[in-house]
Amino acid sequence: MDKTLEFFFDLGSPATYLAYTQLPALCAETGALLVYRPILLGGVFKATGNASPITVPAKGRYLLDDLARYARRYKVVLKFSPHFPINTLVLMRAVTGMQMHQPERFQAFIDCLFHALWVEGRHLGDPAAVATVLTEQGFDPEQVLALSNDEVVKAALKDNTERAVQRGVFGAPSLFVRDQLFFGQDRLEFVREALG
């Protein structure tokens, strides 16, 4: 049986952050290999005609309450920046570039960004704030910016996003066990069952 769990993610999604906090333990319990697939959620929305639930007032209010419930269940901090939502294009290019060119630092890189964004509630839509976070965590902001401006990296993120849409992804987090899609941080028990 294939024991690979593909995690299609965008840092700017609070539901993605919640799933991210749970996946290492889930994969350890099931013996699955966790494979990160960076995507641009805005690109997914554009390609599928979908939109963030936060854009529908009643749904947005409900979602915020529901995410808070899941944070309590998972025993993790979830703190929204007053600047939410942010444009994650540069961040997700940087994530893609780090995965391609410095895979040994990839996990530490996404860990520091998820923590800054969703535990500390920092404004990672602001390049100066991103540079500060990266410097604090031992990353070179200029090197990261260079990765995010690399044409091969840009093309890779676009390709990841297009392939995700072709596979049926319409939002984040999206998880695949073989060809079976699971959407949302609230579907992790089904993911666990599929991994058997």
Image: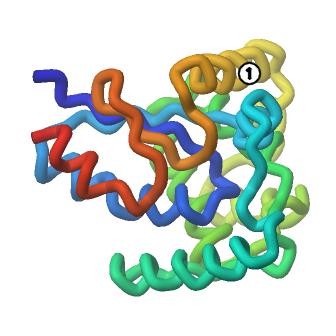
What residue would you read off at disc 1? 158
Residue lying at 64% horizontally and 58% vertically, measured from the top left: 13
Q: Position of residue 121 (x, y in %)?
A: 70, 78
Q: Pick whichever, 150 or 90, lies toward us.
A: 90
State how the image is colored.
rainbow
The residue lying furthest to the front in this view is: 58
Q: Is residue 179 above or below residue 127?
A: above
Q: Is residue 180 above or below residue 28?
A: above
- Quarter of the image where one finds residue 14: bottom right
Q: Is residue 86 left or right of residue 187?
A: right
Which quadrant holds the C terminus?
Answer: top left
Q: Residues within 10 Å of mark 1 (few under 14, many from 20)?
A: some
Q: Position of residue 94 (x, y in %)?
A: 71, 38
Q: How many marks?
A: 1
Q: Pick whichever, 129 or 12, lies toward us.
A: 12
- Quarter of the image where one finds residue 86: bottom right
SS at badge 1: helix
Q: Is residue 74 left or right of residue 166?
A: left
Q: Is residue 79 above or below residue 53?
A: below
Q: Position of residue 48 (x, y in %)?
A: 73, 32
Q: Position of residue 169 (x, y in %)?
A: 57, 33
Residue lying at 74% horizontally and 78% vertically, measured from the top left: 58
Which quadrant holds the N terminus?
Answer: top left
Residue lying at 47% horizontally and 47% vertically, measured from the top left: 183
Residue lying at 51% horizontally and 40% vertically, measured from the top left: 106
Give the amino acid at mark 1: Lys
